[in-house]
Every structure is written in structure tokens, then in C-alpha cells.
Image (cartoon, grey):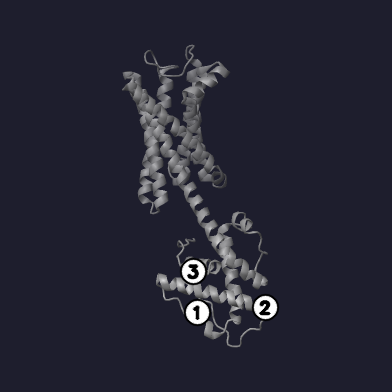
Amino acid sequence: MFDEITGISDLIEDMGTGAIWAAVLLRIPAACRDRRQRGLCIAVAAAAAAMTLRLGPVSKAIGLVARDPHMTQLTMHLFGAVSAVVVLDFLLVVTGGGPPRQRLHLVGAALLLSLVVFDATAPAHTRDTVAAYGAPLPSLEFWLTLLGMHLAADSTCVIVCWRYSRRSSKGPSRTSLLLFGLGTAFAGLFWVGYLLYIPVRSPWIPALQSLAMGLHGLLRAASISVPTLLDTRQVVDDVRTLHRLWPLWRDMVEAVPFVALYKPRNHLREVLCPQGPRKLIIYRWLVEIRDAILVLQEHVPTDRAAAPEPGSPASRCGDAHAFARMLREARRAKLAGEPPHTDAARLVHSGGTDLAAETEFLVRVATAYRRPTAPCTLPKPVVLP
């Protein structure tokens, strides 16, 4: 039973370590652009490095190369202590409260230096650990300082995450804060386990510590992955919108070239490698489509004008198909060199009261334009900021 729990705990810790590294690597591009995210990314990366050095195969491999397991463990503890200081620094930056950051940096540097001093002045030892028996190595003072740093940082982080998650009205922000706070709580349980293990030395505590550290890694990875997943979803939505608009936009700017800021390129290049942010490209395409329609409407007689869009799903589809059919006829007439009608129709209606509604309508028109004989299906509503 004990061996099974230990094996499961070790597996969860391995999974947590892998997950947190994957989340950090995916978050690096955003962290390079945002100073606040940079601090969080550094804190989580330091924690991931400490978790990595805890893994048996990693520590053994480093021990074979460096031939000094003591230095591997000291490095692991220093990485963890740096992570605690950076987490507190990140909280100061985000909340704008608490003591000045310079004071935190000085106190953190002093505590890190004290860990090195405690280790260097201790009697000769080969490991920095709390073994199943005997005094903690390198000293009890070393471990109390390390535990105090982690517990202070973790308890502060949990309180701040809980408080600000309750104030947050946005679902993703609230979820991210709660996950980060919960992951930090498991990290705090890990260090509480050490605090209990020093006097008790129960063999169950290390197994539960591995479980707590693994859950900490999984939850923190999930927390910092929330923005990444949202960004990925937004990119996918934007690519889908560009893909749907492209046939209509291409034909409109080919019929009325002067409305286009740039000449149309290959479909894949326009969708996957746009000449600017996708949000702005979508907005520019909408403007250029509307400008082209203003010109093309002169080639549609009044008796062929589309009826206003009543609003029901079926009629909305029918309106989009009718609108697309008239655009196709107007484009053909314009390219054939036919003169404008004296009783030209007014084809321009927004399809909604805001940009998102207009985008949704033109996506329906583009779908009907591309597949005039396809059955009517309403596309997923487009959400724009």
C-alpha cells in the first residue's frame, strides 16, 4: 500500500514538472512583451527548475557529472527560495501595495545569502536534506530559514489570489487566480510537510509531499496556461473569420481595386501570414468590402434590391444568400464594363448595430457567396473587442 501511494505520488510529481515546464515555454512570448507577466514567468520557471532537481533521475545524472550531490540539493533549495522572492515581487507589482520592492529585494538577497552561509559554515556534509534519522543537514537554522521564506511567500500568495479572484468580474482572470492560489496552497502544504517531518520523521510525509508538489505543478501550469489557451482560441477564431471572408473580399477588391490598401495575395498567406495583426486585418477587410459594395450597388437595379433583414435565423440566411447573389451579379456587370443604372439599388445595410454583428452578417454573406447552392447554416457568432 505504501509503495503504491509513493509510486502514484512520484508519477504525479513527474507530470506536474513536465506540465509546468510546458506552460512556461508557451508563456515566454507573452512574458517578453509584458513586464508583469515576465515576473510571474520567472517565478514559475524557478519553481520548475527546483522541481526538476527534485526528480531522482535528474539529481542522479547531475551527481554523476558533478560528483557532488550536496551542490545539486543546495542549488535546488536556492532555486526554490528565489521563486518565493520573485512571487512576492510579482504580487507587489500587480497589487501595488505592501512594502517597497527595494526592501523586499534586500531582505530576499539577505535570506538567500544566509542560506549559503549556513551551508558553508556547517560541518562537512554530503547532502542538504532531512533524512529519516539524525539532525537536519546542513543545519536546523538552514531549514527554518528556508521554510520561513516559502511559507511566508505561499501564504501571502494564497491570500492575495483569493482576495483578488473574488473581486474579479472576468471569468478567465478569476479562474487563473483561483488555480494559481490553489497550486500555491499545495506548495505551502509541501513545506508544512517538512516542518512536520523534522520532529516526526514519519515515512508517509515524503510520499504526500511528492503528491502535493505534483499537484502544485499541475495547478500552476493550468493557471498560467489559461491566457495562452484564450490567445490560441482567439487566433483560431480570427483565422476562421479571415478564411471565410477571403473569397468575398478578394472578388470585391478585384472588381473595385482602388478600395484595397494592399493587393490580394495567396489565400494561405493572407490567412496564416497576414500583413499585420489579424484583428486589424479583419476590420480593414470589412471596410474594403463595404467600400466596394458602395461602388457595386450602382450596377444593381432597384427592383433587384434585397429586402431588409427581418432578424429570424431562416430569414437571415435567406437575406445573406440574396445579398451574395446580387453582389455576384453586380461584380459581373462591373467587370463586363456595363454602365451604372440610373435607378441603382441601395445594397448597403449593416446587418447589425455594432462591429461584431456586422462581421457576423458579412461572414454569412461570404459563406453564401462562396457556396451559393450549399444548405443554409449560420456560422458561429464572431466576437470582436
Residue ID for mark 2? 336
Mark 3, other Cα within 10 Å: few <14 / some 14–19 / many ≥20: many
What amino acid is labelled 3 in the image? Phe
Residue 264 in percent (x, y) is at 66, 63
Residue ID for mark 3? 361
Q: CA distance from mark 3 to mark 2?
A: 28 Å
The residue drawn where x is 58% and y is 79% is 297
Pointer 3 or 2: first along the chain: 2
Q: Is residue 48 above or below residue 309?
A: above
Q: Nearer the viewer, mark 3 or mark 1?
A: 1
What amino acid is labelled 1 in the image? Ala
Residue 284 seen in render: no
Residue 303 in percent (x, y) is at 52, 85
- Please give left or right for residue 231 compared with residue 195 in the image: right
Which dot marks residue 202? none
The residue drawn where x is 54% and y is 74% is 325
